[in-house]
Image (cartoon, rainbow, N blue to C red):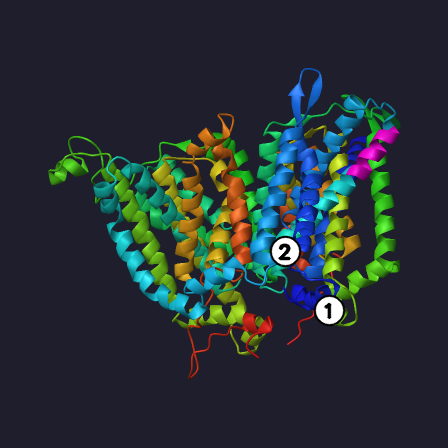
């Protein structure tokens, strides 16, 4: 039981990170109907910016008060990563607006290769370790088994991740449902041509969608750095594929779906590694995806596609 | 594109968009953006140092990068974007630019390329005797990708099913042959059809449950399947030898004759002098013939009812269903046949390398094959050839950029930039020609007159 609870906490933490990345996929898919393959690499860019900014603040400028440092790192990495997200959209996707479906997919894959190799060249291929910054936590439960005592711990780091994710999710739901920008986004999602006839700047709305997705990916990147303490130029691929899987599992185009899918993928991965084998955790996540899609072809919370003839 | 056209009159009221001032302003914006983007990557470098990470500032490189972007954008603005007489216009009018003439060129280009491919090994051995081995090896590699491209073209180009995990079938083919050779001592020619069949079976197994899915849902499941295969190959240590791979895969024989030195070899039997190049030429012809078979089968299938059904499915699935076409079986055959050719190519890959490991079957391979198909122009056979030559030949050519080292100093390693340039080329070609290099797609079945317009073009607002 204690073991189960501990795995549950770990799974929710990992799932929060996946969920934050998955929102970027699902928003972009919702609005222009393309898989933004470079989004995982935007997450990686965010992680690198967060790491560099953290080092600048702590080693060069000599800040020591951790909450302020983390807040500044968060804001800076969100801003800079957003610039990356905007640029990727401007260079690789906007010229192909209105082209056939596979063209932006190919440029997205191309962009993903470009970003990975750009970071590899400029920052080197070796992993970058960062010692854990936030230590300690609360012990929730204590149980004993034949092997000794098991503690159920919720570390401060995990608390921060889950709390930030909840805040961001709430903020985003409000943004989408209450603000003019969110309304414009939903309008573009339903019918881009009609939206532009009604005076919505479609290009700007799409750009802002990419910016928002990239900002969330930057948050996920910062959390990844703090939680795992090791990044390299290749983390974007696997995280991206998992997050996209999460978005599809939850029903692509749906915000709560992306979060739910992210949590599920995180839980499946952690439980599978905890109870069966670490090597096959990816297989488990992908198999669950395939099984869910067989029975619910548009994901858990997705709207079934209405075919217009 | 449409948006930029509508913006033009508005900008014109504010001032001449083609003025020098506008160009410089735009270039300055681009440089500012480059500065922001590059700051954390070019301006700063983190390195592992004793006691944590070390931060190194590289102001010089950062400023150079900003200046390069400024100059590049300014030149582009002055000569292409913000001028009434773009240099590209005179360039494109000089070339046979229109799609129709390109298609005409494509017709005889096809036979020209075929003739060249037939004599290719001898061309290189005669004209480049010192580097023939390298060139023929490159030709084998390109031919493998052409075959893979043609195989995937059946799935993506003809049947319109987006498959992001094609490399899985390539891996199945390669591992089937390697394992059959290891456990049952099978030779290449015996294993080849079996590997193809096994890959086709995997195509069916994967295809059966997922073909209800549409479009991008299918894409992610195929991607997931590709990863599953790779992870299993990586972790099933007892059977596949895991990350260490399988080595000592037998070479193909020429009707029982091994291509080796000395008694009983190919050269000995025919009474000619042994030369290691013979094995490369032999391998080249094997993959060449396999690729030709792929092409031939595809071309013939397009004329069969099943091929027609594929193309109909690509254009409109609902119409297909209402006309009584069994869409499930149609999709499954496309999947299985595409997978089969992937399997053939896989076993050829295994015998050529003599060693395989899961490393060779990453998502990047799938992406490259898909890029070849889409860049070539979906459904176009000759387009795949051109795209494969450009992309694969291009990457390999980048290996030989040693002279750049003299320009930029010895710390500069051009091989590092290979994949970066590859990715950029993918983006640029796609933006330049969104419908692929050979973009005319003639339907195989036509009623009375040939029309150039496909359903997808109508959807883009053309052809009404």
Q: Position of residue B198 (x, y in %)?
A: 43, 50
Question: Considering the numbered disc 1 on the image, is that residue within a helix, a strand or a loop?
Answer: loop
Q: Position of residue B135 (x, y in %)?
A: 32, 41
A33 or B61, which lies in front? B61
Q: Is residue A243 above or below residue B413?
A: below
Please give the residue where the numbered disc 2 appears in the rendered image. A93
Q: Position of residue B315 (x, y in %)?
A: 53, 71
Please give the residue where the numbered disc 1 appears in the rendered image. A191
**10 Å crowding of disc 1: few (<14), some (14-19), many (20+):** few
Question: Considering the numbered disc 2 on the image, is that residue within a helix, a strand or a loop?
Answer: helix
Quarter occupied by residue A280: top right
Q: Is residue A252 above or below residue A41?
A: below
Subunit that carries the residue with mark 2: A
Res B435 visible: yes
Q: Is residue A13 above or below residue B13?
A: above
**10 Å crowding of disc 2: few (<14), some (14-19), many (20+):** many
Give how far apart the Cα atoms at labels 2 and 1 are. 18 Å
Q: Is residue B291 above or below residue B97?
A: above
Subunit that carries the residue with mark 1: A
B362 or B252, which lies in front? B362
Quadrant assignment for the N terminus of chain B: bottom right
Residue A22 - label: none
Looking at the rendered image, the disc whose residue lies closer to the viewer, 2 or 1, is 2
Quadrant assignment for the C terminus of chain B: bottom right
CB contact under 8 Å: marks 2 and 1:
no
Residue at horizontal 61 percent and vertical 32 percent from the top: A122
**Going by the image, does B316 lie left or right of B46?**
left
Q: Position of residue B51 (x, y in %)?
A: 71, 16
Q: Main secondary structure of the magenta part?
A: helix
Residue B79 on the magenta segment: no
> Residue lying farthest bottom?
B448
Magenta residues (range): A67-76
């Amino acid at each position: 039981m204690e073991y189960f609870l501990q795995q549950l906490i770990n799974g929710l933490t990992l799932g929060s990170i996946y969920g934050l990345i998955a929102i970027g996929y699902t928003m972009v898919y919702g609005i222009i109907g393309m898989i933004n393959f470079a989004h995982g690499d935007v997450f990686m860019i965010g992680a690198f910016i967060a790491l560099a900014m953290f080092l600048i603040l702590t080693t060069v400028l000599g800040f020591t008060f951790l909450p302020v440092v983390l807040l500044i790192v968060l804001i800076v990495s969100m801003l800079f990563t957003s610039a990356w997200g905007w640029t990727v959209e401007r260079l690789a996707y906007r010229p192909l607006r209105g082209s056939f479906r596979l063209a932006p997919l190919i440029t997205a894959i191309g962009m993903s290769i470009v970003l990975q190799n750009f970071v590899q060249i400029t920052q080197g291929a070796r992993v970058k370790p960062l010692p854990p910054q936030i230590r300690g936590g609360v012990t929730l439960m204590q149980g004993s088994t034949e092997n000794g005592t098991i503690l159920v711990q919720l570390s401060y780091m995990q608390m921060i991740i889950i709390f930030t994710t909840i805040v961001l999710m709430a903020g985003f739901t409000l943004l989408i449902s209450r603000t003019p920008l969110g309304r414009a986004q939903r309008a573009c999602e339903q019918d881009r041509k009609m939206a532009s006839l009604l005076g919505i700047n479609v290009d700007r709305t799409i750009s802002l969608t990419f910016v928002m997705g990239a900002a969330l990916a930057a948050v996920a990147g910062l959390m990844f750095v703090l939680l795992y303490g090791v990044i390299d130029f290749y983390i974007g691929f696997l995280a991206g594929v998992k997050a996209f899987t999460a978005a599809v599992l939850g029903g692509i185009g749906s915000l709560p779906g992306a979060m739910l899918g992210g949590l599920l993928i995180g839980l499946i991965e952690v439980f599978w590694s905890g109870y069966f084998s670490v090597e096959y955790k990816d297989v488990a996540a992908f198999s669950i995806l395939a099984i869910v899609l067989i029975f619910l072809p548009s994901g858990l919370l997705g709207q079934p596609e209405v075919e217009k003839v | 594109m449409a948006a930029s056209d509508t913006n033009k009159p508005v900008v014109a009221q504010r001032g001449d968009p083609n003025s020098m001032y506008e160009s410089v302003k735009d270039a300055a914006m681009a440089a500012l953006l480059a500065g922001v983007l590059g700051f954390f990557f070019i301006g700063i470098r983190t390195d592992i140092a004793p006691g944590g990470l070390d931060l190194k500032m590289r102001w010089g490189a950062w400023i150079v990068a900003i200046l390069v972007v400024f100059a590049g954008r300014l030149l582009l603005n002055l000569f292409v974007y913000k001028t009434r007489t773009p240099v590209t216009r005179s360039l494109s009018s000089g070339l046979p630019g229109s799609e129709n003439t390109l298609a005409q060129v494509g017709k005889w280009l096809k036979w020209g390329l075929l003739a060249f491919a037939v004599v290719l090994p001898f061309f290189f051995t005669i004209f480049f005797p010192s580097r023939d081995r390298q060139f023929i090896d490159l030709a084998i590699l390109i031919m493998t990708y052409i075959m893979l491209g043609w195989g995937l073209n059946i799935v993506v180009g003809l049947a319109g099913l987006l498959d992001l995990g094609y490399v899985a079938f390539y891996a199945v083919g390669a591992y089937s042959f390697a394992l059959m050779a290891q456990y049952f001592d099978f030779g290449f020619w015996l294993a080849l059809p079996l590997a193809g069949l096994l890959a086709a079976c995997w195509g069916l197994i994967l295809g059966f449950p997922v073909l209800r899915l549409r479009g991008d849902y299918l894409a992610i499941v195929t991607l997931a399947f590709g990863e599953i295969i790779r992870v299993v190959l990586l972790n099933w240590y007892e059977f596949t030898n895991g990350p260490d791979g399988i080595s000592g895969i037998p070479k193909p024989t020429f009707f029982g004759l091994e291509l080796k030195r000395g008694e009983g070899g190919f050269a000995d039997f025919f009474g000619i002098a042994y030369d290691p190049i013979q094995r490369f030429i032999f391998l080249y012809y094997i993959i060449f013939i396999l690729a030709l078979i792929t092409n031939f089968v595809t071309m013939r299938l397009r004329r069969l009812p099943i091929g027609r059904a594929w193309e109909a499915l690509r254009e409109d699935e609902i119409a297909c269903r209402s006309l009584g076409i069994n869409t499930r079986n149609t999709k499954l055959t496309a999947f299985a046949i595409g997978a089969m050719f992937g399997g053939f190519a896989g076993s050829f890959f295994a015998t050529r390398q003599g060693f395989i490991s899961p490393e060779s079957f990453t998502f990047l391979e799938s992406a490259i094959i898909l890029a070849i198909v889409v860049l070539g122009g979906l459904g176009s056979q000759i387009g795949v050839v051109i795209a494969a030559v450009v992309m694969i030949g291009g990457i390999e050519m980048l290996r030989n950029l040693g002279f750049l080292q003299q320009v930029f100093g010895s710390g500069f390693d051009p091989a590092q930039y290979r994949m970066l340039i590859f990715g950029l080329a993918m983006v640029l070609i796609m933006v330049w020609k969104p419908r692929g290099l050979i973009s005319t797609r003639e339907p195989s079945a036509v009623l009375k007159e040939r029309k150039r317009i496909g359903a997808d073009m109508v959807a883009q607002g053309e052809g009404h």
